[in-house]
Amino acid sequence: MSPKINPTLSIIIPAFNEIKRIGKTLASIRAYVRDKRLACEVIVVDDGSTDGTSDFVEGLIADMPYLRVLRLPKNDGKGAAVKAGMLLAVGQQRLFMDADSSTDIREFDKLVPYVAQGFDVVVGSRRIEGAVIKTPQHMIREVLGGMFRTLTRALVPLGIYDTQNGFKLFSAQVAQEIFGALETKGWSFDIEALLLARNLNYCVKEVPIIWVNDNQSRLRWTHMIRMFLDILRLSQTAKQFLKFCLVGVLNTVVDFGIYYALTRGLWTFQDSILVYKALSYLVATVCSFMVNRYWTFAKMAPIHYGELLRFYATVGLGIFVNVGVQYVAVVIFSLHDLVGVLVAAAATAIWGFSFAKFFVFKE
């Protein structure tokens, strides 16, 4: 049931089996709303809980008439729950926060001034100067989190240091547009939401907050694997790398095809090994250059000869990289020769892609 008065703020709380933790969070919100005399709505989105979370929350509505419960038919993921809540909300500003209250609702006071300054999305952050982490995570979780942040910045550069903290504020129009287009259902939905904000040219501000770790976090290894796969799906760089590798396969096919034609079909060059190898290499590399330029990196500007020269230089140096890595893998680390070939191929692909992206075509 919709509130009778349009609220200034909608607070969305995704919840999956949160009966033991959500009571404290809602009590904090109730005290905050009372102290601030705030016109708001609180939407708890039950993501298919089996522990009675919805019934528990509904029992609090008498003391919190602005509280609503949205029951989802099955556990679909945190992203799906936040999306459902954001699209149901009617507040002029829309905040989502975690059910464990690791970021207290009073930190909202730090975010809201930036909306008045014209920012469309305001992100509560644990990772920038001024943030306070009262209770740190376990060392293993902290190391894994650091690796995830590094990977995210490399593959989906957003200019945000803390993409995963569950405390983000959106204006109503921006929330409708971003979450209406959101596809990620799991834990990495924040990354897609921020990516959509960047692609839509919305202004995003990262603000330091106070954060308290909850050791009962529901993030599991399976979630981390899914998050990694989501990053690959969202990353333009990962998509380009996949295309680059496919072009490498095409390059090999073209090279071998020309080699075969010159040695088996066109007898003119049968006894000129250096000539036919030079021709097959030249044509295959030009083919690789063209496909990478127009397909992998979608560069439509006129071709400069410097690009082709840089491409040939990169490919030539890649041969030394391949041989060098294979030598180190097999001779120094005593790996199986086939393993050495695979390691060298991977290193050469990463080398070639990095130089193609930042040196040859200079994105």
Image (cartoon, rainbow, N blue to C red):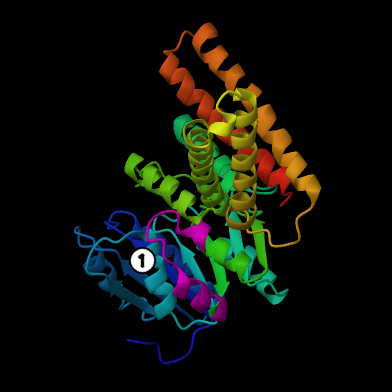
Q: Main secondary structure of the magenta part?
A: helix
Instruction: Judge left or right: residue 157 versus residue 17.
Output: right
Q: Position of residue 299 (x, y in %)?
A: 68, 58
Q: What residue type is disc 1 on?
A: Ala
- Give percent across and percent down for residue 348: 58, 30
Viewer-closest of 325 and 149? 325
x then y, percent, for residue 103: 51, 55
Question: Which residue is identified by label 1?
Answer: 81
Q: On screen, 71 above or below 104?
A: below
Residue 282 in magenta stretch: no
Which is more toward the observer, 86 or 93?
86
Task: Indicate the secondary structure of the residue bearing disc 1.
Answer: helix
Q: Residues within 10 Å of mark 1 (few under 14, many from 20)?
A: many
Whole-percent x, y for residue 11 in the image:
46, 71
Q: Residue at x 46, y 91 (%)?
A: 5
**Who's the residue at 73% across and 73% down the image?**
117
Residue 34 shows in the view: no
| Residue 17, picture quadrant | bottom left
- In this orientation, does residue 88 appear? yes
Q: Quadrant of the N terminus?
A: bottom left
Hey, which residue is sitting farthest front in the picture? 268
Image vertical order of residue 167 relative to residue 307, above or below: below
The residue that appears at 39% across and 41% down in the rendered structure is 215
Pick the front one: 224 or 133: 224
> Which range of residues does the magenta coloring cover?
173-192
